[in-house]
């Protein structure tokens, strides 16, 4: 079984067997030599792991004595040197006969996990318009790896689109912060708002225009209804007036900016106006 995933590669075959092949599956290149003592330790370990990963990666063994120019091309100054390729590009490398656990840890950064593969398949299903199947795929990925960020983000986006914002917020809350997670959390908070209250809020505000809490509630509801400029105008009015409600209104505006994205004209214009109102 191991031999299926291990081959000797020379300069003539390197483009085909390493660079091109790595667009389909990660390829680990072992630069070695017969006289190298540490190579005799690391080489068998890499071959064992290639069999254990059962197609998760392929191992290409390059004899540096026979392929000196190729070794020089990749800056090999000591052996064994191991280089990982993905999508036609070297993405990571190490030199020396590392302990097995260290090699395993290095491979985990290069070789997709089962959860990675499930999340990628779910992404493809979503691109094909198969939302229900994609949701099942994301959930299967999360069952395999509960902290898998890509699967959680994909599932949260589906939940928001399905008006299940509370579930999305619960899913996103434990994840490491990122721009995409911030955007989804803002969208989920908006999605949880009942937009049917807008006419009532507008009527109440017409009779009580100084009620800033009402104005914030209206601004948030307008954002949930995708009336973004009207929302930002209402919230900015609260910030401009100052007082205890200013911070709540500012945070609500930031949610709108997250959903619209930094390049949206409304984000640019109102972010500038918000700065002027604050400072």
Image (cartoon, rainbow, N blue to C red):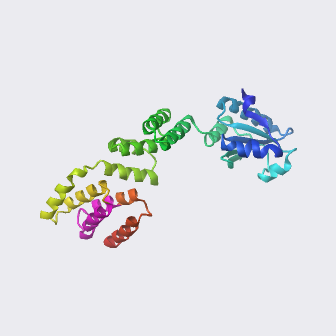
Residue, x 66% and y 29% (percent of image)? 52
Pick whichever, 158 or 168, lies toward us: 158
Left/right placement of residue 5 relative to residue 254 reads right
Name the one closer to the observer, 210 or 117: 117
In this view of the protein, can residue 147 be seen by the observer? Answer: yes
Q: Where is residue 171 in the image (x, y as percent from the top left)?
A: 39, 41
Q: Which residue lies furthest to the top in this view?
A: 1
Expressed as whole percent of the image width and height from the top left, the position of residue 257 reads 38, 60
- In the picture provided, is 76 more to the left or to the right than 118? right
- 140, above or below 92, in the image: above
Can you say which quadrant of the picture contains the N terminus? top right
232 up-or-down from 27: above or below: below
52 in magenta = no
Magenta segment boundaries in residue numbering = 228-253
Question: Which image quadrant for residue 279?
Answer: bottom left
Total tally of numbered discs in the picture = 0
Q: Where is residue 100 in the image (x, y as percent from the top left)?
A: 68, 35
Task: Inspect this view and state whether residue 95 appears.
Answer: no
Please state which of residues 28 and 4 is positioned toward the viewer in this rendering.
4
| Side (left or right) of 43 relative to 131 | right
Which residue is at the far left?
207
Magenta-drawn stretch contains 245: yes
Q: Is 55 in front, or is 126? A: 126
Answer with left or right where residue 229 lies relative to residue 20: left
Q: Position of residue 86 (x, y in %)?
A: 66, 45
Q: Is the magenta stretch mostly helix, strand or loop?
A: helix
Residue occupying image coordinates x 66% and y 33%: 55
């Amino acid at each position: 079984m191991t031999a299926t995933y291990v081959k000797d590669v020379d300069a003539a075959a390197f483009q085909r067997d390493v660079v091109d092949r790595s667009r389909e599956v990660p390829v680990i290149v072992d630069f070695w030599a017969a006289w190298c003592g540490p190579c005799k330790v690391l080489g068998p370990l890499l071959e064992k792991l290639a069999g254990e990963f059962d197609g998760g990666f392929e191992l290409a063994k390059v004899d540096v004595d026979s392929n000196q120019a190729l070794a020089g091309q990749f800056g090999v100054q000591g052996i064994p040197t191991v280089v990982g390729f993905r999508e036609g590009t070297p993405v990571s490398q190490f030199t020396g006969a590392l302990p097995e656990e260290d090699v395993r840890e290095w491979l985990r950064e290069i070789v997709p996990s089962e959860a990675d593969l499930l999340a990628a398949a779910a992404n493809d299903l979503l691109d094909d318009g198969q939302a229900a199947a994609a949701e099942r795929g994301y959930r299967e990925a999360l069952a395999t790896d509960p902290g898998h960020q890509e699967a959680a983000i994909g599932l949260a986006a589906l939940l928001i689109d399905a008006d299940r914002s509370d579930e999305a917020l619960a899913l996103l809350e434990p994840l490491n912060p990122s721009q995409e997670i911030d955007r989804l959390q803002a969208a989920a908070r908006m999605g949880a708002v009942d937009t049917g209250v807008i006419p009532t809020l507008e009527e109440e505000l017409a009779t009580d225009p100084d009620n800033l809490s009402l104005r914030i509630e209206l601004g948030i509801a307008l954002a949930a209804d995708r009336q973004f400029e009207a929302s930002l105008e209402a919230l900015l009015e609260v910030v401009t007036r100052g007082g205890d409600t200013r911070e709540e209104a500012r945070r609500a505006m930031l949610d709108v900016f997250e959903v619209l994205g930094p390049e949206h004209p409304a984000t640019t214009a109102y972010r500038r106006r918000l700065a002027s109102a604050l400072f």
